[in-house]
Image (spheres, helix red, strand yellow):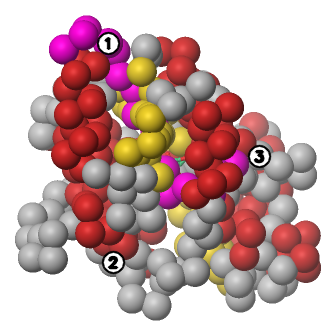
């Protein structure tokens, strides 16, 4: 397995694989790999001849006061995991290797990025879109795998790829969960034992919304209240950041679930902010 930290070297290697006619998949990550990331790597492995995993804690997607400095970094462990999973190259650049001191070019998606995490984390998706396009230029992938766990990110990346005509297929991977339902996340490591017990509330709340939807509830307000009540009950230490039901394509809030709807939640525990989501699909809906 190649371990590359230099941007020009990464691009040379990717172009060499392209010249040999190899199909390249990239899995962009911020490291601190867990089973969620590994599932993405397996999907990439099954679909491409060369798999590149990028490990980069991207400063431009963190706001002031967010967790950039304390974000877990465990390169040796990540490297070993990638090697065990048959990855062909790990690209782990420094911040300086990715951003010139006078970097001044940004990729900004201006519609899907506005609500949900975009509202609570101004500038976050501009950082994500910019680094994803840069990583695509450096790794020259035919396809890239992203997790449904970060539902808004996945939709923003698809929109950027469409709008900028990037020749990259975006593959979505289902959310991998702990035994109690908590979506795996590198940030779960921040949780205190008490918060960790309460964190199951996110998935339980989504289960409750799914159950009511299956029983015929279509009013977004009622579904949102059911989610809020479950979080209040199971996670008293948490403050909801948002509980939203939005059109799955436009990410605009909807009143009635008469078309595929993304149910997205974010809650803040004292030690970590967690997100989760599900999609509700009415049978015979408009889409
Ligand atoms: P991150 O390292 O958190 O930036 O995540 C890198 C990629 O892994 C993103 O596409 C995430 O959506 C995806 N991912 C993170 N956690 C999970 C999970 N529990 N299940 C599936 N994919 C995930």
The percent coordinates of residue 21 (x first, y second) are 25, 9
Residue 162 visible at all: no
Picture layout, residue 48 above or below residue 264: above
The disc placed on residue 79 is none
**Residue at 25%, 61% in the rendered image:** 98
| Label 2: element kind | loop
| Label 1: element kind | loop
In front: label 1 or label 2:
1
* Residue topped by disc 3: 177
**Residue at 62%, 50% in the rendered image:** 78
The C terminus - image quarter: top left
- Comes first in the chain, label 3 or label 2: 2
Q: CA distance from mark 1 to mark 2?
A: 38 Å
Does the magenta run of residues contain 206? no
Res 201 → quadrant: bottom right
Give the extent of the magenta segment: 19-34
Q: CA distance from mark 3 to mark 2?
A: 28 Å
Picture layout, residue 51 above or below residue 10: above
Task: Tell me the crowding category of disc 2: few under 14, some 14 to 19, or many 20 or more residues within 10 angstroms, Cα based.
Answer: some
Picture layout, residue 153 above or below residue 229: above
| Label 3: element kind | loop
**Residue at 75%, 37% in the rendered image:** 214
* Residue topped by disc 2: 122
In front: label 3 or label 1:
1
Is residue 208 rendered to the left or right of residue 224?
A: right
The percent coordinates of residue 271 (x first, y second) are 71, 84
Res 254 → quadrant: bottom left
- Comes first in the chain, label 1 or label 2: 1
The disc placed on residue 22 is 1
């Amino acid at each position: 397995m190649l371990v590359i930290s230099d941007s020009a070297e990464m691009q040379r290697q990717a172009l060499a694989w392209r010249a040999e006619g190899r199909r390249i998949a990239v899995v962009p990550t911020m490291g601190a790999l867990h089973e969620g990331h590994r599932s993405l790597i397996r999907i990439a492995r099954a679909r491409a001849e060369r798999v590149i995993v990028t490990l980069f804690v991207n400063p431009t997607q963190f706001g002031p006061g967010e967790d950039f400095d304390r974000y877990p970094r465990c390169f040796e462990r990540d490297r070993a995991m990638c090697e065990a999973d048959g990855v062909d190259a790990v690209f782990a650049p420094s911040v300086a290797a990715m951003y010139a001191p006078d970097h001044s070019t940004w990729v900004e998606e201006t519609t899907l990025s506005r609500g949900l995490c975009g509202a609570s984390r101004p500038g976050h998706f501009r950082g994500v879109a910019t680094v994803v396009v840069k990583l695509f230029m450096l790794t020259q992938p035919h396809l890239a795998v992203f997790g449904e766990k970060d539902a808004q990110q996945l939709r923003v990346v698809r929109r950027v790829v469409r709008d900028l005509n990037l020749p990259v297929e975006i593959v979505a991977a289902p959310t991998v969960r702990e035994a109690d339902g908590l979506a795996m996340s590198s940030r779960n490591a921040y949780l205190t034992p008490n918060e960790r017990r309460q964190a199951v509330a996110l998935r339980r709340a989504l289960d409750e919304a799914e159950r009511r939807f299956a029983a015929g509830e279509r009013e977004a307000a009622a579904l949102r209240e059911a989610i809020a009540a479950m979080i209040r009950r199971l996670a008293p230490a948490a403050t909801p950041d948002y509980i939203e039901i939005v059109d799955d394509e436009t990410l605009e809030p909807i009143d009635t679930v008469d078309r595929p709807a993304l149910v997205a939640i974010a809650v803040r525990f004292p030690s970590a902010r967690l997100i989760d989501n599900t999609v509700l699909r009415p049978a015979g809906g408009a889409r």
